[in-house]
Image (cartoon, rainbow, N blue to C red):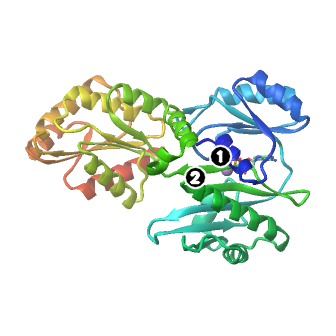
Amino acid sequence: MLEYQAKALFAEAGLPVPRGELAEDPQAARRIAESLGGRVVVKAQVPIGGRGKAGGIAVVETPDDAEREAARILGLEIRGYPVRRLLVEEAADIQDEYYLGITMDRSRQAPVLILSAAGGVDIEEVAEQTPERVAKVWLDPAIGLRPFHIRQAAYQAGIPNEALRPITQIAAALYRLMKEHDAILAEINPCARLADGRIAALDGKMEIDENAVFRQEKLASWKEDEDAEHPLEVEAKKRGLAYVKLDGEVGIIGNGAGLVMTTLDMIQRQGGRPANFLDIGGGAQSDVVRSALEIVLSDPGVRSALINVFGGITRCDEVAKGLLAVLSEMDVKIPLVVRLAGTRAEEGRALLEGSRLTAAETFTEAAEKAVAAAREGSRS
Ligand code: GDP
Ligand code: MN
């Protein structure tokens, strides 16, 4: 779901969102800026965060500037997502930026309310370096979100008293909205305190539980819209590959959905972030291996890749031959780690010796090497 869609839901739920409209070209951005009269913010609509840091958000003073910035932002590709739509909103006069979110904590099997007085684009660093500034209050779904939960979180988070009432109303409405739409995440960052004291949702994000999409008609079409958004996923679908774009640096190719899922977990456990899910299935021929490598390597976020193959019917020496053939024709600039296990794994590894592929024997070793290579890659 994109920001403007989340904000449409916010508005229906009575949450305070700035006035604004969607633009698909610079002229439309200018017209919206004119009709809003005065300062506006031009915002890239892509299904990921960090747009501000990527240059996808601009606060401008005049319709001329709105048009110019719109043209610039429409030419951007933010972490693989070309910008096709812009949200043009009246700009807010921000005093403070809070973070307000509700999500599912799987390990506690409960929703959790997350609140911080140090919201904005650096919330991740705040959470990592000063976790005490990010308050978390776990909820019982049978009881729901009550004002005392919000007071407790606000007190821990250091939210000033005068903001408590509006924040309480916003959090309560957000919780209702989540329940109504089967969301697993609803987030407002920044939830801003404006110069005139009002609180407004300046950014919005919602994630719907995929298992509930069938009963959320409007959201189902938004979901399809979003799926069609990433060019690599579209290309992979054409090639018949089971590929899902993720947000990290380590590209993953494996045979079998279970093995690939486990590989994502292993990368995470080693402190890395997977860049994608890609299952090439059983008995993968070298043309499938090539096609998979091409997709993974076209992701500009990828710094290393891990090819994790368990040979059953698939023979590891065949996979190794396939990989070598592909590499002799492709110019690969990032480190590739290969783990072969099962049928004819030793023969496969022997074939890879002396090539520019890094062979790994165990799963852990492979994940470690891929994560280390990605770190090296992002430093150089
Ligand atoms: P994100 O980077 O993808 O999370 O995009 P946001 O919508 O959160 O915008 C990033 C940052 O841009 C915010 O934290 C604000 O600091 C700034 N910003 C967004 N909207 C406005 C606005 O209306 N006025 C001003 N002055 N700054 C804004
Ligand atoms: Mn944001």
Q: Quick check: can you spot residue 379? A: no
* Mark 1 neighbour density, 10 Å: few (under 14) some (14–19) many (20 or more): some
> 109 or 376: nearer the eye?
109
272 over 321 or under it: above or below: below
Callout 2 environment at 10 Å: few (<14), some (14 to 19), or many (20+)? Answer: some
Q: Give the residue displayed 50% in from the left and 31% down from the top.
A: 228
Q: Position of residue 353 (x, y in %)?
A: 17, 40
Which of the two discs, 1 and 2, sits closer to the camera?
A: 2
Q: Is mark 2 within 8 Å of ligand 2?
A: no
In front here: 272 or 166? 166
Q: Identify the image quadrant of residue 311.
A: top left
Residue to which mark 2 is pinned: 181
Q: Could you tell me if the residues under marks 1 and 2 are in contact, i.e. CB atoms within 8 Å?
A: no
Look at 88% across and 29% down and name the residue there.
34
How far apart marks 1 and 2 lie (CA) works out to 11 Å
Q: Position of residue 66 (x, y in %)?
A: 81, 30
Picture mark count: 2
The quadrant in which residue 32 appears is: top right
Residue position marked by numbered label 1 in the rendering: 6
Q: Is residue 103 above or below residue 226?
A: below
Of residues 253 and 208, which is closer to you in this image?
Answer: 208
Q: Is residue 147 shown left or right of residue 359?
A: right
Task: Give the residue type that dot 2 points to.
Answer: His
- Which SS class for mark 2? loop
The numbered dot on residue 111 is none
Report x, y in % for residue 67. Answer: 79, 26
Instruction: Kindly identify the amino acid type of the residue bearing the numbered disc 1.
Output: Ala
- Residue, x 42% and y 54% (percent of image)? 272
Residue 262 falls left or right of residue 19? left
